[in-house]
Image: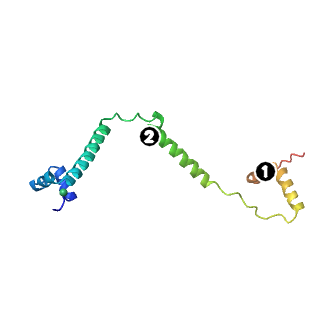
Amino acid sequence: MSHLTSEQISDYLSAASDGGVQRHLAGCAQCRSEVERLDAALRGFRAAIHQWAEAPSPPPAAAGLRNPWWVALAVAAVLLVCVLLSRQAPAPIPAAAPASDAALLNQIDSDAARTVPAPMEPLSQLVSWDPEE
Ligand SMILES: [Zn+2]
C-alpha cells in the first residue's frame, strides 16, 4: 500500500482528513510516527508562540534616544553642517603670479602696508589722509 502524502498528513493534523487517512494510520506504524513527529513539532511551535506573546515587552530604550524631537534636531544639525561645508567657496586663485621673488616680496609689502582694506580704498581716496604725516 502507498503511504500518506504530506498533504494528507497536513489535512489530518488540521482535522480536515477523511476516514481513509485514519484507517491508514491505524494500520501503518511508519505514517503514524511521521504524524506524531510533525504533531510534536507543531505543538512545540504553538507553545513557543504563546510563550513569546505572553512574555513581557522589552524595557523601553533610553528616553533621549526614544524622543523623535532630539533625533530630528540632530539630523537637521548634521544636514546644516554638510550644506555649509559644501557651499564654502574654494580658495581664491591669485590673478597674476608675480614674476620673481622680488616682485612677490614687493606685493606682500604693499599688501601689508595698506592701511585700509581693498574694498574701502575708493573711500580712502576721497578722504586724503596720510598716516605718515
Ligand atoms: Zn503508511
Q: Which amino acid type is shown beneath numbered disc 2?
A: Pro
Which residue is painted at 48% across and 39% down in the image? Answer: 70
Side of 90 relative to 48 (left or right):
right
Q: How is the image coloured?
A: rainbow
Q: Residue 97 at what x, y percent from top left?
A: 80, 64
Q: Give the quarter the ligand 1 occupies.
A: bottom left
Q: Residues within 10 Å of mark 2 (few under 14, many from 20)?
A: few
> Disc 1 designates what residue?
124
**Label 1 amino acid?**
Ser
Helix or strand or loop: what does disc 1 sit on? helix
The residue at 48%/35% (across/down) is 64
Query: Which residue is at the front of the view, 21 or 133?
Result: 21
The image quarter containing residue 57 is top left
Q: Residue at x 33, y 35 (%)?
A: 55
Place of residue 60 in the rendered image (x, y in percent of width and height, measured from the top left): 41, 34
Please state if 74 lies on the left or on the right of 54 as rendered: right
Observer-nearest of 11 and 22: 22
Per the image, the residue denoted by label 2 is 68
The foreground one among 18 and 56 is 18
The secondary element bearing badge 2 is classed as: helix
